[in-house]
Every structure is written in structure tokens, then in C-alpha cells.
């Protein structure tokens, strides 16, 4: 089952997900309003509503190489139950994240093809080039949320992300 979450994200992008409008993006994240920052923002990303830890979360979907490289760089703040999911499209043995030009502290959950969290790296420091890598086998996704979100919501390895 390639993987439960892949099918869920595809269904979300085709159905219940929607293209991020300027207004929707403002509700999800707040960025510096300068022209230079606007030029650095990735192409329009789809948004999806998912469930994790009993909470509904809204995530931007970074599915292209350009979007994954950009990530949450230059974002000034992010609402509590919002995040970004990085979709790799194929299994990745060792995925690493860094915080270069990322202004807000984040945690990242690495997720396998069934939507199960296999590893969480907590407390990634803003503007750092330290690597935060998956250590628990192949993953298809990485989910970035505000620092402390996973712990606050009791989310741990073994828990599953869903679209229900």
C-alpha cells in the first residue's frame, strides 16, 4: 500500500486541499513583507488538513525540490496547529533538515510511508546549520511544527498522521 499517507496526500491535493492563496498563507504563516522576502518565497504550495495527536493541523505541502529547499525559511511566526510537510515521493534512507534562514524554532517528525512517525527531532534552533537527521529507516515525509508542539500534544514515535 504505497503507502497510506501518499494516497491520502494525493487525495487531499485533488479534493479537500486547496492552493494557498495570499489570505490563506497569511493565516498559516507570517512572513516579512519586504520585496526581497517575497521573492524568496516558494511557488504556491497546496494546503492540507490532517490529524495528529487528536488535533487537526493545517500543513503546507512542500513536494518539489525547490519547495523542500525553501521550507520555512524567512517565516516570522506560525500558528499553533500549522506546519509544513515535506513529501519526498520515494523512500529516503537518511533525510536531514537544517534551520538556515529559518527564524522560528521547530521540531520535525520523520514519517514512513504508512503515515507512522518513526523519529522526532526536537528543539531545532533558528538560523542554525546543524543537521537534524532521521535515524530510524526509510521515510517518505518530514513534518515540521513549532518547537514543543509534538511534546505538548503527546505525539511520539509510533503515532500516525491521517487525513480523517
Image (tube, rainbow, N blue to C red):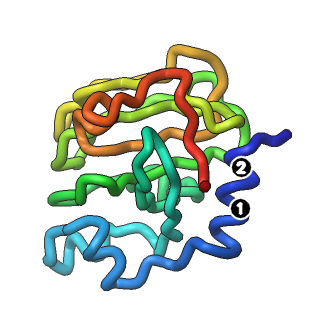
Q: Which residue is drawn at 23% across and 33% down?
A: 148
Q: Residue at x 70, y 73 (%)?
A: 14
Q: Which mark is residue 10?
A: 1
Q: Which residue is drawn at 71% across and 49% down?
A: 6
Q: Is residue 100 left or right of residue 136?
A: left
Q: In this view, does 24 lie to the left or right of 112?
A: left
Residue 53 screen position, x and y as percent: 43, 39
Tell me: residue 153, above or below residue 86: above
Binning the other alpha carbons within 10 Å of mark 2 as few (below 14), some (14 to 19) or many (20 upward) gives: many
Q: Are marks 1 and 2 in contact (CB under 8 Å)?
A: yes
Tell me: residue 9, above or below residue 157: below
Q: Which residue is drawn at 32% across and 36% down?
A: 153
**Which residue is nearer to you in this view: 163 or 99?**
163
Residue 155 screen position, x and y as percent: 40, 30
Tell me: residue 101, above or below residue 60: above
Q: In this view, does 143 lie to the left or right of 94?
A: left
Image quadrant in which you'd find residue 13: bottom right
Placement of the C terminus among the 4 image quadrants: bottom right
Q: Which mark is residue 6?
A: 2
Name the outermost residue toward the front. 54
Image quadrant in which you'd find residue 33: bottom left
Image quadrant in which you'd find residue 138: top right
Q: How many labels does the image show?
A: 2
Is residue 63 visible in the rendered structure shown here? Answer: yes
Q: How far apart are marks 1 and 2 (CA)?
A: 6 Å
Q: Which mark is residue 31?
A: none
Amino acid at each position: 500500500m504505497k503507502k497510506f499517507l501518499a494516497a491520502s496526500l494525493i487525495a487531499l491535493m485533488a479534493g479537500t486541499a486547496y492552493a494557498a492563496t495570499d489570505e490563506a498563507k497569511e493565516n498559516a504563516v507570517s512572513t516579512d513583507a519586504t520585496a526581497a522576502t517575497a521573492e524568496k518565497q516558494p511557488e504556491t504550495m497546496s494546503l492540507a488538513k490532517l490529524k495528529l495527536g487528536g488535533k487537526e493541523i493545517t500543513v503546507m505541502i512542500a513536494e518539489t525540490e525547490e519547495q523542500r529547499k525553501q521550507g520555512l525559511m524567512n517565516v516570522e511566526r506560525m500558528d499553533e496547529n500549522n506546519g509544513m510537510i515535506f513529501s519526498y515521493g520515494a523512500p529516503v534512507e537518511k533525510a536531514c533538515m537544517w534551520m538556515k534562514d529559518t527564524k522560528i524554532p521547530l521540531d520535525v517528525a520523520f514519517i514512513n510511508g504508512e503515515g507512522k512517525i518513526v523519529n522526532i527531532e526536537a528543539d531545532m534552533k533558528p538560523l542554525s546549520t546543524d543537521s537534524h537527521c532521521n535515524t530510524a529507516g526509510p521515510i517518505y515525509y518530514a513534518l515540521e511544527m513549532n518547537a514543543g508542539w509534538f511534546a505538548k500534544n503527546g505525539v511520539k514515535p509510533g503515532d500516525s498522521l491521517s487525513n480523517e
